[in-house]
Amino acid sequence: MFGRCVLLLCSAVGCFQAEAAGRLAGTAGMTDAEGAAGGGITTWALIGGYDTREQVAGNSFFTTSSTQTYHLDVSGASVGLYDRVELSYARQHFGLGDVAPGQAINQDIFGAKVRVFGDAIADQDRALPQVALGVMYKHNLDYAGVPQAVGAQRASDYEPYVAATKVWIDGVSGRSVLLDATLRYTRANQFGILGFGGDHSDSRCLCWETSGAAFLSDHIVSGIEWRRKPNLLNAFQERAAYDGFVAWIPSRHLSFAAAYVDYGDIAGRTHQQGPYVSLKLDLN
């Protein structure tokens, strides 16, 4: 739940500077902690990688985040196909700290996203955002331990979503601005770290997530994001997650992000907050 958290927001708003070839710097977004192009805890309609409609491009990423109790490491990669389709993979390693000393929960996430219509960057003369449909397949590798013990009903699940992203290159005070809204159909407990479904309810629910970011300079972005989570377990009540971040995008090939995130309550430990850092390498 957590690495995502953060800032990956870094960029779709992007530096918006033309490079020799391909898309503009920053317009590939960052990679969220679930492997898709977007913010730290939100998934955007942007397609990851700097592929144009005639190109294929890929990227890899690593994020790490700590709270008072837990630690999350996430690594993965994605490929963008012709600025239309994105395929992604992420492995999450969630250390349980003093809740279960020496133990961790691992989760694999496979994602696919398709841009349906609109262009968040190019359509500056239109109000229409870029809209994408996507799905994530999440598999909790350690479901038989803590997730099942707290009431989760399954180890794996599919999670469809629709995302809408709009960028104004000449936005507030002349700064580039990005806004995103995503609707996710999910029954993931703590983003799947605690399994799927619960003893309170095994039904999916529609959960909103949103983010906003603005360029403070040509290469520095700052923003916030918020994500609602379902509340399916009798043992624990989940709260929405949110963060604030700053990102540095020195080139199309390298992005750094740092943030402070509030993950809400995790497995009975309240107000789990802490720093988050992320590195993304674009390989095209």
Image (tube, rainbow, N blue to C red):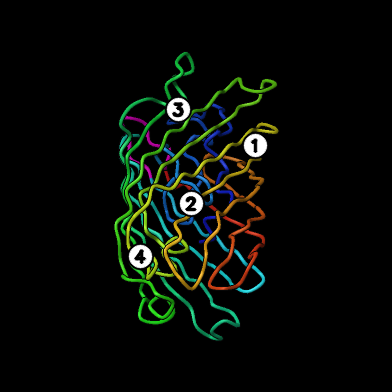
Front label number (1 vs 2): 2
Question: Real-space Cα distance between discs 2 and 3?
Answer: 18 Å
Question: Is tag 4's residue or tag 3's residue first in the polypeptide sequence?
Answer: 3
What amino acid is labelled 3 in the image? Ala
Judging by the rendered image, the residue that carries numbered circle 1 is 219
Callout 1: few (<14), some (14-19), or many (20+) C-alpha neighbours within 10 Å? many
- In the image, is residue 53 part of the stretch drawn in magenta? yes
Query: Which tag, 1 or 4, sits closer to the chain's start?
Result: 4
Element on which disc 4 rests: loop
**Label placed on residue 120:** 3
Q: Is residue 280 left or right of residue 174?
A: left
Span shown in magenta: 48-57
**C-alpha gap between disc 2 and disc 4:** 23 Å
* Marks 1/4: CA–CA distance: 41 Å
Q: Is residue 246 above or below residue 76?
A: above
Q: Locate residue 45 relative to residue 101 in the image: left or right.
A: left
Considering only vertical position in the picture, is 2 above or below 134? below
Are the residues at dot 1 and dot 3 in contact (C-beta closer than 8 Å)?
no
* Position of 19 relative to 144 (above/below): above
Identify residue for label 2: 32
* Lower position in the chain sequence, tag 1 or tag 2: 2
Q: Position of residue 263 (x, y in %)?
A: 58, 60
Give the distance between the C-alpha atoms of the residues marked 1 and 2, in whole angstroms. Answer: 19 Å
- Decide: marks 2, 4 in contact (CB < 8 A)? no
